[in-house]
Amino acid sequence: MNVPAPAHLLSLATASPSHSMRQDEVLEAATQLFDGRFPQFERMAPVFKHAGVLTRQLAMPVEWYLQPRTWPERSAVYDEVALDLFCEAARRALDEAGLTGAEIDVIVTVSSTGLSTPSLQARAIARMGFRPDAAGIPVFGLGCAGGATGLGLAARLATAQPGCRVLLVCVELCSVAFRMEDFSKVDIISTAIFGDGAAACVLSTGADGFAAVAGYAEHTWPDTLDIMGWRVRPDGLAVVLARALPPFVRKEIRLAMERMLASQGLTVEDVDRFICHPGGMKVIEAIEGAFGLGQGALDRERDVLADHGNMSSPTVLFALDRIRQAGLPRRSVVTAMGPGFTTSTVTLAA
């Protein structure tokens, strides 16, 4: 029986919007907005100092967020800025791989912070020079898990058609969901941690890259739909984020990881480095505790959170990029959690 050749990561690139804000600037703007309109803001304000975020990049200047916005206005920003980030990250990934857009066979686009029809990939054809017969696969609804799930999907597609070249692009504009009406505690927390960004990579079985995809797995917990996701509001999408997430991760993630790795003949101890989505400081600490890594072990993840905030799906690929620049170990596992409630893993062999 012939064993399919593994998909290799040929390149990895990131992109960020040009509008940057320091966390103290975000806190100042949030104080102007929330204080007096949300009675519990003063008590919750310390979350900005303890979120682990020092700066972040946003789709629009801060003034844009200080006025009520309709769903069409948010969608227009998404169509423009998400497309720019898509093309920037994709072009950088193609350049590193030594390829052009015309040499890509499949484009997987992961995004959950906006709706675009035609898809971002279709809008990018002229700019990127994609072939008319390239397959486009837009994926919505994965949230923060999208970077890991998308990477696993791209690897499956590359393996299924040996020699084809698959471009994965994850792009999110979390800030576009910022709302000025009907405030909740979740809106305060979201304002403290979320940012915007994109990441892209090229995979193929036809060439060696900086890592091979050795396996992938997912796990969805039953009766957990209320932990994370979106609510549809008249003015756009509103975030759902349960306060119980860090305790849930601390309690549940180890067993789920053991089961996912067991399907590949591995144990937690066989992994040299877990490359995790830094959803927030408390989540990072919960993961370190659950895996027995020691506080501070997820150092690159902390760095990404500090420099960019939680960008949803591309964030774990930002962490992977930093770790691969420092030197990937022999075996690593890319992992992220998102709505469902789901965790996804991709095992890499360097």
Image (spheres, rainbow, N blue to C red):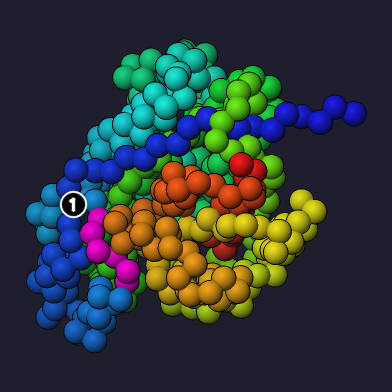
- In which quadrant will I find the C terminus? top right
Instruction: Answer yes or no: is residue 254 visible.
Output: yes
The quarter of the picture where residue 50 lies is: bottom left
In percent of the image, x 23 and y 50: which residue is there? Answer: 58
- In which quadrant will I find the N terminus? top right
The quarter of the picture where residue 89 lies is: top left
- Where 54 sits versus 42, above or below? above
- Where 22 sits versus 137, above or below? below
In percent of the image, x 36 and y 56: which residue is there? Answer: 304
Q: Is 193 left or right of 328, judged from the image as shown? A: left
Give the extent of the magenta segment: 51-56
The kind of residue on which mark 1 rests is: Ser
Q: Name the residue under label 1.
A: 20
- Where 278 sits versus 131, above or below? below
In percent of the image, x 45 and y 48: which residue is there? Answer: 326
Residue 297, horizontal then vertical, whole percent: 49, 67
